[in-house]
Image (cartoon, grey):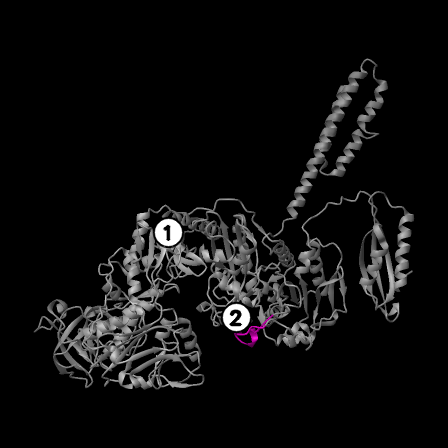
Amino acid sequence: MNTPLSWIKAYVPDLDCTDQQYMDAMTLSGSKVEGFRRLDKNLEKIVVGMIDQITPHPDADKLIVCRVRVGAENAGANALPDAPDCIQIVTGAHNVKEGDKVPVVLDGGKVAGGHDGGSLPEDGIKIKKGKLRGVESFGMMCSVEELGSSRDMYPDAPEEGIYILPGDAEIGSDAIELLGLHDTDFEYEITSNRVDCYSIIGIAREAAATFGSSFQPPRPVMRGNGENAADYVKVEIADPDLCRRYVARVVKNVKIGPSPEWIQRRLANSGIRPINNLVDITNYVMKEYGQPMHAFDMSTVAGSKIVVKRAEDGEEFTTLDGQVRKLDHDVLMICDGEKEIGIAGIMGGQNSMITTDVDTVLFESACFDGTNIRLSAKRLGMRTDASGIFEKGVDANVTFEAINRACELVEELGCGEVVGGCVDVHGELPCDKVIPLRPDWINGFLGTDIPAEDMIKYLRKIDLDVDEKAMTVTCPSWRQDLEQEADIAEEVARFFGYDNIPTTLPRGEATAGKLSFKLRVEQLARTVAQYAGFSQAMTFSFESPKVFDKLRIPADSLLREAVTISNPLGEDYSIMRTLPLDGLLTSLAANYNHRNKNVKLYELAHIYIPSGRQAPVYASCSKDHACELPDERVQFVLGFYGEEDFFYMKGIVEEFFSKAGICCRPVYNPEAELPFLHPGRKAGIVIEGVQVGYIGELHPDVADAYEIGERCHIAVIDMPFIVDMATFDRKYTGIARFPAVTRDISLLMSKEILAGQVEAVIAQRGGKLLESYELFDVFEGAQLGIGLKSMAYTLTFRAKDHTLEEAEINAVMKKILNGLSDLGAEQRS
Amino acid sequence: MSMNEKLEKIRQEALSRIEQSGGLEKLEEVRVAYLGKKGELTEVLKGMRDVAPEDRPKVGQLVNEARAIIEKRLDEARSELARAARELKIASETIDVTLPATKMPAGHPHPNTLALDEVERVFVGMGYEVVEGPEVELDYYNFEALNIPANHPAKDEQDTFYINKDIVLRTQTSPVQVRIMEKQKPPIRVIAPGRVYRADEVDATHSPCFHQIEGLVIDKGITMADLKGTLAQFAREMFGADTKVKFRPHHFPFTEPSAEMDVSCFKCGGKGCRFCKGEGWIEILGCGMVHPKVLRMSGIDPDVYSGFAFGIGLERIALLKYEIDDMRLLYENDIRFLRQF
């Protein structure tokens, strides 16, 4: 929404402020000004001149020499010797003749742009006296492009050449004033609740209230000749759910011509192209009242009848821009007795278009359902100025006022004879709302101490009616957003000034500030990962279904059942991830591609498992259908390529478990189904019989698919499991007071036997006395024999309450070795 | 030579040899020569039997005195030598302290996390609990319960990702407000950080997936002044003690009155610079008093309780605070970028 300040000032006559002051004050009272554009920016020393005499240039065929009367004061030292009020200007323009009045920029002045109408230079173009082909020139006559405008905004300007001013322009006066360019166009961000502010009147009302000035809006009165519009046209609303009100008025003996200058300037300065008086009036009223209007040529309205009804599915209709539109049953149409003549609220039809030889016009001002217009415009792919306003919701009372304003302008501009009366079809009209005014409650709510009389003053400034006896506020229908006391409190706060509300801190019962346990465990994961050299990544939660192929996920895998977005940005962003790998691998690949060395990344990534596959994490939803929601699980995913190996990753995983207070050793299951990992270098991570994650080297095919040219390792830990198992509680177990005894054993076994199996035996057989065990050597070699390997462990024994005797240790050692022997691992001699 | 003179001579000689020793070994020789089993002073004591009995105590005392002096001097000389030796060692151990440091292997947090940690620190300090809610959310919580009616333009498909007609990817963290109010009795003070989704194409200032931090306070007698005071304090903690705040009226369907908060530009202090586009102020967050309809729908009586809510764009804070000029960097995870945090 934008408004030229001049139009606002027309209704707030004593508004007196700078552009910046206006912007700041309006923003602080709730009409946010995004910015403003001064229309006279870089227009300096531009006056009205009259061409006295034109002579050919002695040395150039395309140039002429003009003697231009600008007044003695403006001519100054540059005046012609024989005429103190004239200067000489050389020009290449050919549309001027003697006696024309033109805008002249004097020596030392500025214009906004070049004559080609290209983009305007920031600091304008300085004009200095000089010589053109040897003849002195003391200024320049201007085209509308040089004035920073265009022929769109000055339809009477020549296609090329100097803009000719009206004959009654006063020589030597300010040409910019005459051109209506001493104006500023303000751009607002209007919030969706303030439909009334999508209009000059709405903004002007806010401006008057903001600056404490009087507000004098137009107050149209219904006039017309002795006839009755009802004799010209009948109106029927067949679908009242989509059309709350339809007002029709008739204008006959229409005389199409240009609008007066003041209408043209107000439209042009709002960025609307003046066209002719009739079109300009509808545009003017749309801007002024925020009510789109339409004009039909009465001679094309068959049966003198208007019917507002839904279109038939599949129908076609040609709009006035010549495009054929395909309709459906949800599109509301304006029809006459036989056919469609317009798409309601969006665009008229070619078949009922106003032409210059129109005689009788039917004005339409209607209140259509905003949502329907919005959705129809979207389906049809034609968002117009009118639909943009309708979709915000028009006040049915304004609908009536606006058409009368249009007819008033028709009379004022003399562009036709307004037929008396109107055809006004409507259902129930919106009425004023009454809200109690409790100053104490408002002060309690805002934390202020505003006197009641000030509140009443603020509310009256914006045309809300306050009954001081009943202490109620009556809100007019154009303020549909005001529904309850909190809304009234906001109106009071806006004009009291948000900045004047004091700053306090909430009192009352203290609450404990804290992170949830889940977040604490996640914080721990971050800490461990970062200390181990991993940096935190963040990747999108949605991805392409192609990811499953890239990760070698079998066609029948449950992992392929994902939460699917029905309107994604594209296939690449269409499913919610069920695995946390793609984002991280893509990031690693990007790093690899940038030749970054040894990159380690981690992410705390959400995955989304469709409902029904697992119990929802958020079981606390109060609504019954809550179980439709997917299970959102945080997964701690780590990945790196470069120097380190599988066991480095394993170390981090175990460090995390240990810091999370999980004391039992995880078990690694190499048989776990992990198709994206190297078949010989992968494992499921199992704690107390539950697979809580997995670890391994990326399958070479997957690494190729992501174009990571080095061995890449990943680990994934399902955090909900860890959160369940984790504890930050610790118990001191004392520092051992009795000495430990160590025994080294060297075992010979088949290569097939895993360290995990050996250790399980050691741990189980070692019992209470075994404090720890540590692998210190693994060796395979020809001298051992084919298919054999040797593993050497240091076992540490200690008792809490006494120094271990040789016999005790030997007994345990024997148990361990027997167990190992059963496994197939024999002690080497 | 009297015994006296003899002892004096021994003492003189011993001390002078100590002075000249110049090394621990030489000192030991001196000790042995005078105080050892066959040392000169020991010999004198051995010769006591030749001394007249009445003189013996006197001589004994003299010998002990001489011995004490020599021993003391020996100790001093020893520690002087040790000190000198240490000083020599220290002097030889000088390193070039300007040589590069050993690199710590530690990784780096994501700038979003860094910013979020800051925000959480401030609000946890003020007694707020950090809570979460689902990203794949019921349309009811994302819109209807927040006073956004069925046909509101904000629900348009162009902004919202739909799973089906009842389920959306939440477009804001505000639905967590409702979930908290439904299950928790006032006083409520929470912040709810999390991921939100809007159907925006990726560019320097937009991402279809980003983060917000929702704040909610519900209690008896909560005022708009409390909202202002709380957020002003947050701004000072976050952006520096001199930070000023400005509240502008705005509109959100779920708060009334609503406001947007600007902070004085933390780059230029409010004078206006390229960073704040010459305005001196930077828009930081949206906030307001929780709408009575929202309270009622969430099971809280608006005649008894009131409250305020606010929503902060995490990426916006991170981009501003760390002067990151392109939002895409946040989701590319280039280590050369992450390493700077």
Q: Is residue A770 above or below residue A59?
A: above
Q: Secondary structure at mark 1?
A: helix
Binning the other alpha carbons within 10 Å of mark 1 as few (below 14), some (14 to 19) or many (20 upward) gives some
Position above or below: A403 against B102: below
Against A722, residue A327 (above or below) is below
- Chain letter for mark 1, please: A
Occupied quadrant, residue A755:
bottom right
Contact between marks 1 and 2 (CB within 8 A): the answer is no
Main secondary structure type of the part rendered in magenta: loop
Let me know if marks 1 and 2 both belong to one chain: no
- Which residue is rendered at x = 84% and y = 52% of the image? A767
Closer-to-camera residue (B338/A548): A548
Q: Position of residue A426 (x, y in %)?
A: 34, 72
Q: Any magenta on residue A568?
A: yes
- Picture coordinates of residue A522 (x, y %)? 62, 57
Instruction: State how far apart marks 1 and 2 are (Cα).
Output: 37 Å
Left-right relation of A602 to B281:
right
Q: Which residue is mark 1?
A: A499
Residue B178 visible in rendering: yes
Residue A640 in magenta stretch: no
In-front residue for pair A219/B103? A219
- Classify residue A208 by image quadrant: bottom left
Give the extent of the magenta segment. A564-576
The type of residue carrying mark 1 is Asp
Dot 2 alpha-carbon crowd within 10 angstroms: few under 14, some 14 to 19, many 20 or more? many
Quarter of the image where the C terminus of chain A is located? bottom right
Q: Quadrant of residue B22?
A: top right
Mark 1 or mark 2, whichever is nearer to me: 2
Task: Identify the residue position indicated by label 2 in the image.
Answer: B161
